[in-house]
Image (cartoon, rainbow, N blue to C red):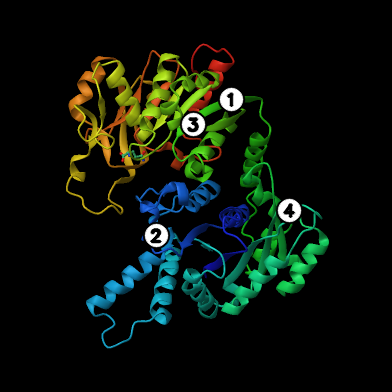
Amino acid sequence: MVKYIFITGGVLSSVGKGVVTSSVGKMLQFRGFTVTAIKIDPYVNVDAGTMNPYVHGEIFVTDDGGETDLDLGWYERFLDINLSKENNITTGQIYQTVIERERRGDYLGKCVQIIPHITDEIKRRIRMVAERSGADVVLTECGGTVGDIEGLPFLEAIRQMRLEEGYENTLYIHVALVPILDVTSEMKTKPLQHSVNELRRIGIQPDIIVARCTKMITKEALEKIALFGTIPKEAVFCSYNVPTVYEVPLILDEQGMGDYICRRLNLMPKQINKHEIERWKSYVNALKNYKYTIRVALVGKYTGLADSYVSMNEAFKHAGAACNTRVIIDYIEAETFEENPEKIDMLKDYDGIFVPYGFGPRGALGKMMAIQFARENDIPYLGICFGFQLAVIEFARNICGLKDANSTEIDERTPHPVVDLMPEQQQIMYKGATMRLGSQKIIIKQGTLAHKLYGTTEIYERHRHRYEVSPKYVEILRKHGLVFSGVSPDGRMEILELPDKFFFFASQFHGEFKSRLGRPSPEYYGFVKACLDRKIGKEKLEI
Ligand code: GLN
């Protein structure tokens, strides 16, 4: 019998529900159970793909090409599983399906309503993920905050699931903020109490409460939460600030949360997975204790919101942990260089320059200036997706002499469209889910840096783009020394490198989406290693 755990949030959003959900999964994995995780996003968008990362945070791409909420990235990184687009449920998807059925006549004669038709569809999707994954435990995180109007049908559906699946097979975890007042240093539990009340009003009594606080909550605060939450003291836990989020499963387990969940769900620990616990602890240690530090300049345009680049940040941490190195990332707004070209000199103080994904013309020139600076000063460079395309354009302009070369995404009338809309994109009218998405095969050329980094000639990486290097310009770029060391079976340029540089590497794909603690993305690893080698004066990259 599959067990369902539902995670709700109170007081504020962005309170760390994703990390708590992932940590619950990790604690269950420590006990030998298999898990999967679902994120519910109550917005009306069908998926996250059409949202601005600057507002909503990064769009996480799954193997099967889902453009999903960034929490799926946390689940994948913590649980080391590959999820599907079905693991992200939105209001848009639910209504689209129900309305399509209604138009087909499936409900003929009936009045179609939120209860039961919308709630049934929500439950169907949760159960479908359970069935397809075959996991022992299905974690479902409800996005937003309890009390949001748009979240109500989802909470109603999970309320019904207790009735249908039984008490022993369902568990509600409520995560809420406990602020500390500056003036008195007091921990205030009142907002949390209110959010529990709100949940109860809907008919859900939490089984477990996780207080999110900067520090471990005091005994008094814990007792208050238990009393007003109507749960035993043993069911109150605290997710306090730790140096690395990967430590959260360890601190919650230490407080007894893993055992409590198993007891409550009648899950007999299969076999304590000592190996996994030790492995996790050693990675956490590696993240906290490093010998070296490097500084990387991330030149982008969504720099005001760290969540826009969350998978990239984590990929740098994974790579750093493997190199005994802390990677400090400074976010630099690309337009700074367009407005004040002399400021480009600041980049010489960095151990590496990184240009991430991006869309549209704003900041593109500034990014290219950073790429040119990296190339000319032989500072290690890594480019991802847009950072790959812009490296090609910079090379075309400054090395191949193709004046005003550009991407048609930036300048439709460029005389040299070295990056152009993919032919199959020309006819596409809809913006949603129509990019080249998800896992795609790449053939790697033997003897190249890419071959050294990946150690194989065939890889699969995740994609999300509409434009590509135009096949018409490949020859001239190659002739001038640009090496395309990875190409897709249908002939698309996927990886570039400049062999005479210390490290100059870029990919059309996003290595960060598959990066895991203990299994860093090879391109991020290679870059971090090169930054470090150059800093400590080693000759050239030795993988
Ligand atoms: N805007 C570019 C494209 O659509 C790059 C996309 C990206 O960086 N993910 O091809």
Q: Which is more foreground, mark 4 or mark 3?
A: 3
- Decide if ligand 1 comes within 8 Å of the CB at mark 1: no
Q: Amino acid at mark 2?
A: Glu
What amino acid type should be assigned to the residue bearing mark 4? Glu
- How far is disc 2 from disc 3 in space, using C-alphas? 32 Å
Q: The disc labelled 1 sits on which kind of residue?
A: Ile
- Whole-percent x, y for residue 537 in the image: 57, 12
- Which of the numbered marks, if any, corresponds to residue 86? 2
Left or right, residue 342 beside residue 171? left
Front-most of residues 181 and 264:
181
First in residue order: circle 4 vs circle 3: 4
Binning the other alpha carbons within 10 Å of mark 4 as few (below 14), some (14 to 19) or many (20 upward) gives few
| Ligand 1 found in image quarter | top left
Mark 2–mark 1 CB contact (< 8 Å): no
Q: Vertically, is 497 above or below 316? A: above
Element assignment for label 1: strand
Which residue carries the number 3 mark?
A: 298
Q: Quadrant of residue 137?
A: bottom right
Marks 4 and 3, how far apart in space?
A: 36 Å
Residue shown at 26% from the left, 80% from the top: 106
Does 353 sit left or right of 280 as displayed? left
Judge depth for marks 1 and 3 and give the one in front.
3
Q: Is residue 523 visible?
A: no
The residue at the point 50 percent across, 73 percent down is: 152
Residue named by callout 1 = 294
Label 2: state its secondary structure: helix
For mark 4, what is the residue? 254
